[in-house]
Image (spheres, rainbow, N blue to C red):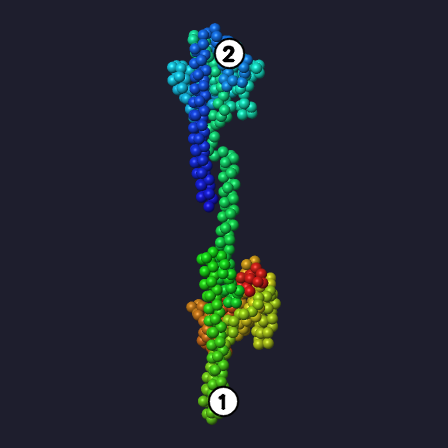
Amino acid sequence: MIVGVLGAQLTSYAIWTSQVRASQLAQLDELSRNVAYSVASTMGFFRSLPVEYRHIVLDQLRNMGGTRFFVSVNERRLAVEDIGSGPGKDLVVGNFREILTDELNIDDVVVEFSRPDTLRVFNNEVRLLDLPPRWGQHSLLMEPLSPPILVVQLELSPDTWLYVATLLPLPEVFSDTRWLSGERLLVALLVMLTVLALSLAGIRSVTRPLARLSRAARQLGDDLDVPPLKETGPREVAATAVAFNRMQRRIREQVEERERLFSAISHDLKTPITRLRLRAEMLDDPIHRERFCASLDELDLLVKGALASVKGLDLHEEVELIAPRGMLEQLAEALRPHGGDIQITGSAEPIVVKPLALKRCLGNLLENAIFYGQRAEVVLQDDHDSLTVVIRDHGPGIPQDELERVFAPFVRLEPSRSRHTGGSGLGLGIARHIAHAMGGEISLSNHPSGGLVVRVTLARQESVTTLQ
């Protein structure tokens, strides 16, 4: 944007400057030719006068005052401090020489420019500024512009030179103005800043809906109940917001339908399981009765695990600011009657989360650590962007190639994680899903000294309303 605007400004100034310069030269050409014809007429008049009448005419001109030309007759050519250069001066001098040559049939005319304060007008080196006012020298002074004075000298005869001084009312005869002056550069800078400011405001107004869409996409992974997007903005963005809201509604409907399906299945299965259990209790053979009851217990455990999985993924809960260490201490206290020895080290600032969901996530992990390792160490690691909870147990660990598979539903590793030891293989999967829903992650690794290390990382939110 900066390069484009600056390039357009510089190009426009270059074109404008060349056009202005061409217009000035055209105006100067016309004016100089008109003055040159007047000077040629004046010189022709003095050339035609008898010598004895020339001083009389000069005295009359001085007494009249206010004429366009200052004329004098001198014994020699007066030295003039010629000033100026550039195409303007070359054009004026060329026009005067051409016209005087054509009109007077001479080719030795001298055309020069002088400043008023250094101009000499007589043989005795009298300066123009020293002449009495009645001699009309004020016609050559145009304060405060002070344009250069054009001086034309022509040899009328040996030891006789006709001197004519006049003004070209264009102060910029010699101005070779740079095409990019300081003023123009300032204007270009102001225009560029104005265009950039307006463009930035327009771009921000266009991209603001995209920022809302990006933020809504991140929040959708944390909570399906976030408010729908405003379907406003540019046409493409509004259409995207409409599609996003429709996708959010369909995902929510599918999740709700899944919950209803599992609830219906569990409700329908409880009745036949209960009937089968009653019939199994009526069997005479104790061995068959025990086997039937064990199978029914396993089936009942699967149904309850499936329901627990569905409920565990239901995170329709308001976020709150909680103290992580306090929650861990409560969970450790609840597990202590079951023989769990949990040591907690480190501290952490309060974090914005869904408390019941986080409690279930950490509870599942601590229960696993106590069940398979009898004792566990918990370390809190806190920084500005995230909170990390590291849980290490002293159990048998998990084979390296099984570290990811254990997060799948109903996966238990034999023999240490057998169904007969309790559990349905859903705890780790539910814990990871809860962590993902809160913008976090769970990873597993084996400790070099034995046991499993679970690392829970939760991103810190800016405010309580971020996750809502």
User: Which of 413/55 is in front?
Assistant: 55
Q: Residue at the location (52% across, 41% down)?
A: 190
For the residue pair 297 and 243, the one nearer the viewer reads as 243
Numbered tag placed on residue 58 in the rendering: 2
- Label 2: state its secondary structure: helix
Q: Amino acid at mark 2?
A: Leu
Instruction: State the quadrant of the C terminus.
Output: bottom right
> Which residue position holds label 1?
278
* SS label for mark 1: helix
Residue occupying image coordinates x 60% and y 64%: 321
Which residue occupies the foreground of this view, 3 or 246?
Answer: 246
Badge 1: how crowded within 10 Å, few (<14), some, or many (20+)? few
Which amino acid, mark 1?
Answer: Leu
Vertical placement of 76 versus 199: above or below? above
Q: How many marks?
A: 2
Tell me: residue 177, above or below residue 379.
Answer: above
Task: Judge whether residue 83 can be spotted in this image.
Answer: yes
Separation (CA) of disc 1 from disc 2:
147 Å
Side (left or right) of 180 relative to 461:
left
Residue 338 at x, y percent in the picture: 57, 76
For label 2, count other residues whose C-alpha is less than 10 Å away and answer few (under 14), some (14-19) or many (20+).
Answer: some
Give yes or no for contact between labels 1 and 2 (Cβ–Cβ under 8 Å).
no
Relative to 421, say whether 277 is above or below. Answer: below
Horizontal and vertical percent position of residue 152: 46, 16
Evaluate whether residue 440 shows in this view: no
> Quick one: which residue is furthest to the top in this view?
52
Of pointers 1 and 2, the one earlier in the residue sequence: 2
213 shown above or below 154: below
Q: Residue at x 49, y 39 (%)?
A: 188
Q: Position of residue 100 (x, y in %)?
A: 41, 17
List x then y, in percent, for residue 161.
46, 11
Residue at 59% x, 66% y is: 320
